[in-house]
Image (cartoon, rainbow, N blue to C red):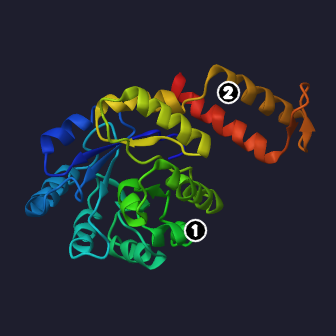
Amino acid sequence: MSTVLTWLYVPGDRPEVVAKALHSGADVVLVDLEDAVAPDRKAYALDATAELLASGAPGPSPVHVRINALNGPLAEHEVRTLAPLPGLAGLRLPKTDSADQVRAVAAWAADAPAELPLFPLLESALGIEYAYEIATATQSVRGLALGEADLRADLGIADETGLAWPRSRVVVAARAAGLVPPAQSVYPNVRDLEGLAASCARGRALGFLGRTAIHPRQLPVIERAFLPTAQDLEAAEEIVKAAATDSGALALPDGRFVDAAVVEGAQRTLALAARLR
């Protein structure tokens, strides 16, 4: 999961849209059973998604499913229905507020053919407060995500500056738990690609890696925003080369101090650059 940059949401009750999304170039397709599906279409969305996943990998992109609220009446049935299916590659857990909720999902998914990666979605003040506990609830947790629309409503935030601390909190919690950096929340204006690029740049500066999208046209913008630049690659190669001849802390010719954490970051940059080839 370390090089996943693009996650594309698609409504689970529209199989024809899901089929297109699988060939959109997204790193992961997120079939949504929650917000994108009307209440009277929930059962159909689950049936359609189960049919899609029943015969193995349905396309070139792995499929994750966002189930319904963990404290609601649908989530357990959805997990028990989907977990055994060979085409399911992961679950996104909306409105996660506690580690116990994550452990409950892991128990519901016990019939999965292999350990199912779980991605808790933090969308409330309580979820943010318990970010690290949620991240370490079970070894099935492979990453955290932030649901900013619901979080804004919960906190009464009208301006984006109010999200600075929750964003950093999620990045720090993921790192402390040894998880991959979280992906940014969706950018809702699918026509404003310049705004999307600028927003991705701000997210990258905060430590996010990649982003969820709601339209295929957003995917190339997100990928470009998070891929390393030529300057990034040059700097990373210099650091890794210097570290190969000296295992301790060292100073580069230009005076920059390099320790193990800096080397690790450079190695991640080079790994990400493999997508450019």
The answer to whether residue 261 is above or below residue 23 is below
| Residue 234, quarter of the rendered image | top right
The answer to whether residue 225 is above or below residue 75 is above
Residue 232 at what x, y percent from top left?
67, 27
| Residue 37, quarter of the rendered image | bottom left
What residue does disc 1 label?
132
Q: Is residue 116 visible?
A: no
The answer to whether residue 262 is above or below residue 73 is above
Q: Is residue 84 visible?
A: yes
Q: Dots 2 and 1: beta carbons under 8 Å?
A: no
- Identity of the residue drawn at 46% across and 30% down: 197
Q: Secondary structure at mark 2?
A: helix
Q: Assess disc 1: are there few (<14), some (14-19) or many (≥20) residues with their C-alpha within 10 Å of its C-alpha.
A: many
- Identity of the residue drawn at 40% across and 76% down: 101
Q: Amino acid at mark 2?
A: Asp
Horizontal relation, residue 39 to residue 142: left or right? left
| Residue 113, quarter of the rendered image | bottom left
Picture disc at residue 232: 2
Q: CA distance from mark 2 to mark 1?
A: 30 Å
Picture disc at residue 171: none
Q: Secondary structure at mark 1?
A: helix
Residue 33 at what x, y percent from top left?
22, 58
- Identity of the residue drawn at 14% across and 62% down: 42
The answer to whether residue 36 is above or below residue 16 is below
Residue 8 at what x, y percent from top left?
33, 42
Q: Earlier in the sequence, mark 2 or mark 1?
A: 1
